[in-house]
Image (tube, helix red, strand yellow):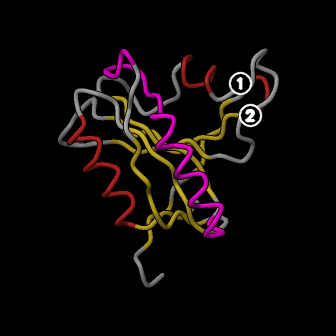
Amino acid sequence: MLILQNCLQGMIDQARRDAPNETCGLLTGRAGRIEQIHALKNVAEEAEVRYEFEPMEHFRMLKKTEREGVPILGVYHSHTASQAYPSATDVERALLPGGADPLYPGYLYIIISLQNPAAPVVRGFWIRAGGEIQEEALSIVGLDS
């Protein structure tokens, strides 16, 4: 998956600002290319270790992207004290009840780890049926690419 450098930097900056809470948002762009991030407020009760989109803000963003014809490519969030890898909770919340199928088929999940704040790690994953996790390489590109 291609990701614009400014999007990557924007996610890292947001994660640092929101720490010690997890940050979160949506990713949009053309198929195979993340071109914009959309920060959403994390309203999880345990925001230091979980993320939950503010429902009305999430709904408004879904309607806006639909109206503008911009596809949502995925979700991003941070792990402030652990590695950039989906936790059991991340996997569970990415699946429909019962765990058989993805809640949002085709969404890429990007995780920003601030385990070492001076050297953040950003990785992308597909969460497939049954909770299978598959890493997706992220290729950073400039605006003119």
The magenta stretch spans residue 67: yes
Image position of 63 with respect to 22: above or below: below
For label 2, the SS is loop
Q: Residue at x 59, y 61 (%)?
A: 65
Look at 63% across and 19% down and name the residue there. 92
Position above or below: 70 against 130: below
Task: Write down the region rendered in magenta.
Answer: 45-70
Would you name the residue on which mark 2 appears?
128
Q: Going 53% across and 44% down the picture, which residue do you hit?
A: 75
Q: Position of residue 29 (x, y in %)?
A: 57, 66
Asked if marks 1 and 2 touch (Cβ < 8 Å), the reply is: yes
* Res. 24 image quadrant: top left
Quick check: 126 above or below 138?
above
Q: Residue 116: which quarter of the image?
A: top left
Which residue extends farthest right? 100
Instruction: Give left or right: position of 70 versus 128.
Output: left
Q: Tell me the distance, in whole angstroms, between the alpha carbons under discs 1 and 2.
A: 6 Å
Is residue 74 inside the magenta stretch? no
Is 20 left or right of 30, judged from the image as shown?
A: left
Element at label 1? helix
Residue 50 screen position, x and y as percent: 42, 22
Which residue bears the numbered disc 1?
131
